[in-house]
């Protein structure tokens, strides 16, 4: 049975696309953070409408929306909500996006404010910096995963190359001692495969520990659009099945050889 490496190639393509999205989002939050820092907070005035009566950007509301507050919303829409994949990936409204990225408390504070007060500006700036840092951390994990998949691909190719070498001489042309040697070589390949599986599982565990607060399962998140959620492990399992088949054939030949 031939082992396909297509899953690994698909995984690498998915990782490239995810990294591009993460970089776009990181730069968007960085730009938004800069605009927040450059904005000018507004002190509330006694004549303003009650804060709870005003929705940011609401037209025809009972209160006036502060120009700085409206400007901050436009900044968010111009940066965070304008990344190329936003509509396809999220499609959220401004309020939904703000709550998803900064948390319900920040979203509520922003929505109920009638002016961009200094505390609100600091809160939004800190939330933007946090979202930027989250993307940076995720990019690091994507880069680690990319290196892991590339390394695993090389290791699997080497293992399959060794298996091809062992298969060059038909079993019917091997004597008992040669078959025993072949059986030992296949056992060594099985041990190498077990090492690769253990290393891959440790990589997955590392990803989960690194980003446990952001996504429940990093590998499933990265490969959600692929036919399998664990492409490397699926490929290793296919290699294992191939080795099992080869080992059984050698065992049968040994049993039939005087």
Image (cartoon, grey):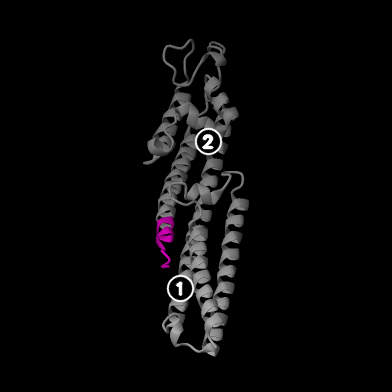
Report the mark closest to the observer, 2 or 1.
1
- SS state under label 2: helix
Q: Are marks 2 and 1 in contact (CB under 8 Å)?
A: no
Q: Is residue 52 above or below residue 243?
A: above
Q: Which mark is residue 101?
A: 2
Q: Give percent across and percent down for residue 58.
A: 44, 17
The front one of 214 and 203 is: 203
Location of mark 1 (residue):
160
Question: Outermost residue toward the right?
Answer: 209
At x 55%, y 27%, the residue is: 107
Residue 82 in view, yes or no: no
Question: Outermost residue toward the left?
Answer: 84
Report the magenta residues as a range.
Answer: 1-11
Tell me if residue 6 is in the magenta stretch: yes
The front one of 163 and 118 is: 163
At x 46%, y 66%, the residue is: 153
For marks 2 and 1, give the CA distance.
45 Å
Instruction: State which quarter of the image contains the N terminus.
Output: bottom left
Quarter-wise, where is residue 6 in the image? bottom left
Q: Which mark is residue 22?
A: none
Instruction: State which quarter of the image contains the C terminus.
Output: bottom right
Residue 168 in view, yes or no: yes
Tell me if residue 255 is in the magenta stretch: no
Q: Is residue 100 above or below residue 164?
A: above
Q: Give percent across and percent down for residue 8.
A: 44, 60
Q: Is residue 210 above or below residue 152?
A: above
């Amino acid at each position: 049975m031939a082992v396909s490496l297509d899953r690994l190639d698909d995984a690498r393509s998915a990782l490239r696309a995810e990294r591009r999205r993460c970089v776009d989002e990181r730069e968007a939050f960085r730009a938004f953070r800069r605009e927040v820092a450059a904005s000018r907070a507004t002190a509330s005035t006694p004549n303003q409408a009650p804060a709870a009566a005003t929705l940011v950007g609401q037209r025809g509301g009972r209160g006036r929306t502060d120009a700085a507050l409206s400007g901050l919303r436009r900044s968010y829409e111009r940066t965070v909500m304008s990344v190329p994949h936003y509509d396809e990936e999220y499609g959220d409204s401004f309020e939904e996006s703000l709550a998803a990225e900064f948390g319900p408390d920040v979203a509520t504070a922003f929505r109920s404010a009638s002016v961009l007060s200094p505390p609100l500006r600091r809160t939004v700036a800190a939330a933007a910096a946090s979202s930027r840092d989250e993307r940076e951390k995720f990019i690091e994990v994507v880069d680690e995963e990319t290196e892991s998949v590339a390394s695993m691909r090389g290791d699997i190719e080497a293992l399959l190359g060794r298996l091809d070498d062992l298969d060059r001489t038909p079993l019917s042309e091997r004597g008992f001692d040669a078959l025993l040697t072949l059986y030992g070589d296949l056992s060594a390949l099985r041990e190498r495969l077990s090492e690769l599986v253990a290393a891959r599982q440790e990589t997955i565990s590392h990803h989960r520990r690194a980003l446990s607060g952001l996504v429940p399962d990093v590998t499933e998140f990265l490969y959600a659009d692929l036919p399998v959620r664990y492409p490397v492990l699926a490929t290793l399992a296919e290699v294992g099945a191939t080795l099992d088949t080869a080992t059984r054939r050698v065992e049968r030949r040994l049993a039939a050889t005087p």
